[in-house]
């Protein structure tokens, strides 16, 4: 059992880390604003006498769906209103040094052996997660069970047919939501990854890439709140959530330092891909739930329009 001084020191380190992180974010925003006001644009954008060379360089870059995506009003850059909303959203208590994450991972009813194996590997991504058998309990009953035992998140992994493997996952933030439902695909266990390493219990760093819209910010904060705020850098482990065209690629690696100038990545696994299907306020309720986002085929009006 840790003594009170160790606990106080740990909380103090977490508080300092969060303050430094917030200060760094604010400075980046101020720098971008300064560049725009000075007419310099974003970093790497040429102005004045360099316009011709900039345009020529731009013309040499091949066009892709990513760099020609449609502009959306929901894109968040330096929006103070969004930051104000985040200060009072469902995840605010975590980012201000509140209750640390405690995650319950379970499966659909009557899971296959493969689903059990994936659930254990999935839970290993989150340092404070534990796997519990589902039994025949309804999701709402599981939500009450987890809330009473002070879990901060509930994750339920699904499969349709036992031979098809896991194909969906529900994230429920406790006690007040939100709830996110993702399609799950491209699942590979650690043993299926060539040259994979073995994960250690160290708290990992978390990287969130390309969550640029209001919806994307919410999903990014959802993932971030499931990890302890201060990583243990000595473990050299990193979990990445990379959003590309609304597909979220999840990977875990370890840094391998060969010397002061060269570093390599060793994949630890598992790996899988998530695609958001709906986001709901509150905890799980498919009949009367208030949906913030619900994807449908009608929304695919263009291959260059993305939501995260």
Image (cartoon, rainbow, N blue to C red):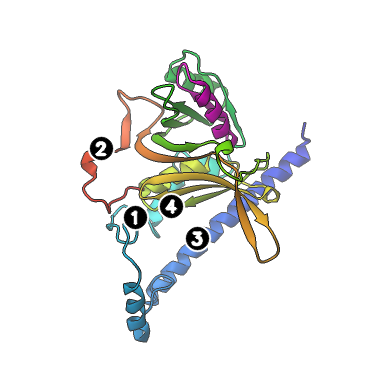
Residue 243: image location, x then y, percent: 42, 49
Name which residue lies at 76% across and 41% down.
6
Query: Mark 3 to mark 2: distance in Å?
Result: 36 Å
Disc 1 secondary structure class = loop
Which mark is first along the chain, 2 or 3?
3
Disc sitting over residue 75 in the figure: 1
Q: Nearer the viewer, residue 3 or 228?
A: 228
Q: Is residue 119 magenta?
A: yes
Query: Mark 2 to mark 1: distance in Å?
Result: 20 Å
Disc sitting over residue 26 in the figure: 3
Q: For mark 2, what is the residue? A: 296
Q: Is residue 92 in view from this perspective? A: no
Residue 250: image location, x then y, percent: 49, 44
Q: For mark 4, what is the residue? A: 83
Disc 3 secondary structure class = helix
Badge 4: few (under 14), some or many (20 or more) residues near its Cα, within 10 Å?
few
The segment highlighted magenta reads: 101-124
């Amino acid at each position: 059992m840790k003594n009170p001084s160790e606990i106080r020191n740990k909380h103090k380190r977490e508080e300092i880390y969060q303050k430094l992180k917030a200060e760094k974010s604010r400075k980046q925003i101020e720098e971008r604003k300064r560049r725009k006001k000075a007419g310099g644009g974003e970093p790497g954008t040429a102005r004045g006498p360099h316009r011709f060379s900039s345009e020529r360089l731009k013309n040499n870059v091949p066009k892709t769906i990513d760099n020609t995506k449609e502009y959306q009003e929901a894109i968040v850059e330096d929006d103070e209103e969004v930051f104000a909303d985040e200060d009072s959203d469902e995840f605010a208590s975590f980012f201000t040094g509140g209750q640390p994450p405690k995650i319950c991972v379970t499966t659909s009813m009557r899971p296959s052996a493969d689903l059990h194996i994936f659930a254990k590997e999935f839970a290993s991504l989150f340092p404070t997660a534990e796997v519990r058998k589902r039994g025949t309990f309804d999701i709402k009953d599981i939500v009450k069970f987890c809330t009473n035992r002070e879990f901060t998140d509930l994750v339920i992994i699904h499969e349709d047919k036992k031979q098809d493997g896991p194909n969906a996952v529900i994230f429920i933030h406790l006690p007040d939501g939100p709830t996110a439902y993702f399609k799950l695909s491209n699942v590979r266990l650690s043993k299926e990854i060539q040259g994979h390493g073995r994960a250690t219990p160290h708290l990992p760093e978390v990287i969130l890439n390309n969550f640029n819209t209001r919806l994307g910010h919410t999903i990014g904060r959802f993932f971030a709140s499931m990890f302890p705020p201060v990583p243990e850098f000595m473990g050299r482990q990193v979990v990445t959530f990379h959003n590309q065209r609304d597909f979220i690629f999840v990977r875990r690696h370890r840094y391998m330092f060969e010397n002061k100038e060269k570093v390599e990545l060793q994949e630890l696994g598992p790996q899988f891909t998530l695609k958001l299907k709906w986001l709901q306020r509150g905890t799980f309720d498919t009949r009367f739930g208030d949906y913030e986002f619900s994807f449908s085929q009608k929304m695919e009006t263009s291959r260059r329009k993305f939501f995260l």
